[in-house]
Amino acid sequence: MNGTIICQSIFETVRKLVHNCMFLNVYSIGNAFTRLRKLTFLNVFFYLLHLSKKSMPIKMADFMADFSSVGFPDVSKQALSKARQGISPEAFAKLHSISVQKFYEKCDDLRTWNGYLALAIDGTSFQLPQTQRNMETFGVSVNQNFSPCAMASSSSLFDVLNDMIIDARIDSYNYGERKFAREHLDGLECIGLKNDKLILMDRGYPSYEMFQELLRRRLAFVVRLNSTFSSITQQAGEDFIVDYKPRGYKEPVKLRIVRIVLDDGTVETLATNLYEAEITLDMFRTLYFLRWGVESKYYEFKEHIQLEEFSGSHPTAIRQDFYISVFLSNLVSILKSDVDSEIAEQDKNTQNKYRYQANRSFLINRMNKYMIKILTGAVKAEEIIPQIIASAIKVRSQKQPDRKYSRKKKQTRRKHHNNRKPCL
């Protein structure tokens, strides 16, 4: 994949955008940044775009030393905290949308499944700073001791084969999965991808209305059914067609029902509108397991990027950090594809029985380190990106295909592991 060219295009577009005075007018909140102050819109914007999990005074000191081209002033942390509330989180969501647009516009070898873009929809929850404002804004989860914890729900539309987050959202803890899913589908239509699209969803999403919605949008789908679909799941057979029509509805939905057997012997029931006989049970089994890629992406957010170590406690700061992390993740995915291709080419004629790939944590760190310098013009993207790729080729990780882990019913309290080091 021409990831280097795509990244350069993204940086060029973002740089022109953020230095345009209209960017400030669109994404500043209220009358923020209308007066001449030490902290300008771009000062604060670039400061936030550089993710760091250090304390605010240390991060400010490091930022001034490492990114002198930004001209970040020596101000109090209170002044910075107030100033960041004047930047809309949608400013960073815009950067993410640019990464998606440029990737699908310029990628010359999109990975597909039988001609379909395989798109998984799934959600997760994030623990937030324990403030009254966050509990009122996002909601709470109550544990077995009836102690409330501030939490938010998030959902993503993820291209599992191309490792790209197409759409991502964060909202209140009780925000419905299906409501998130419909918003993702709206966002997908706005992007206007040319390829046929196949939606993969887990058991929390299917309903008669969701099936109708997917068919109306002419989207292929594979969805795991839950126990509420007993009229279907109790039928005999491993591959059959049903006309699904719950009580109270007039028009039936034609569904193909397939059953796949997991390695532990568990049988899962899937519903799809892929009726072609050439698509076998084994193909459905492989396809459904592609959905695991979105789970790995959430692991990246929580463990590598450490998103839950938010840089601020205000709801605006929560949303800012979320969209910055999504943007950074997409940039890393684009570069990782190029690094993986170079590693595969180098290893093609070796006798080593192991195969390797890029170390994602290393790429996250390098991209986070140089992103601000590229956008401010301190370094040129066409010079620094090849250097990042060259260094990432040397810092490789061994591939471990077909890894299997039994699901733990009780989570360990241990938080710090020798093989899990922060990259920011």
Image (cartoon, rainbow, N blue to C red):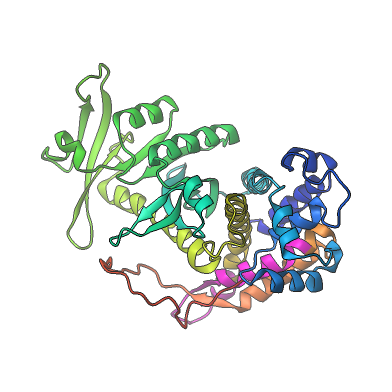
* In the image, farthest residue toward the right: 36
Q: Residue at x 39, y 40 (%)?
A: 176
Q: Is residue 84 left or right of residue 230?
A: right
Using the image as rendered, state which of residue 310 and residue 368 is in the foreground: 310
- Look at the image and give the residue range highlighted in magenta: 344-372
Using the image as rendered, state which of residue 413 and residue 112 is in the foreground: 413
Q: Is residue 51 above or below residue 349?
A: above
The image quadrant of residue 379 is bottom right
Does the segment drawn in magenta span residue 357? yes
Q: Is residue 365 left or right of residue 302?
A: right
Quadrant of the snapshot with the N terminus: bottom right
Does the segment drawn in magenta span residue 127? no
Q: Is residue 200 left or right of residue 87?
A: left
The image quadrant of residue 46 is bottom right
Residue 372 appears anywhere in the view: yes
Q: Is residue 115 left or right of residue 99?
A: left
Quadrant of the snapshot with the C terminus: bottom right
Q: Position of residue 274 (x, y in %)?
A: 33, 36
Using the image as rendered, state which of residue 145 and residue 220 is in the foreground: 145
Q: Residue at x 20, y 38 (%)?
A: 228
Q: Position of residue 384 (x, y in %)?
A: 77, 67
Q: Residue at x 76, y 56 (%)?
A: 44
Q: Position of residue 371 (x, y in %)?
A: 73, 62
Q: Position of residue 128 (x, y in %)?
A: 49, 58
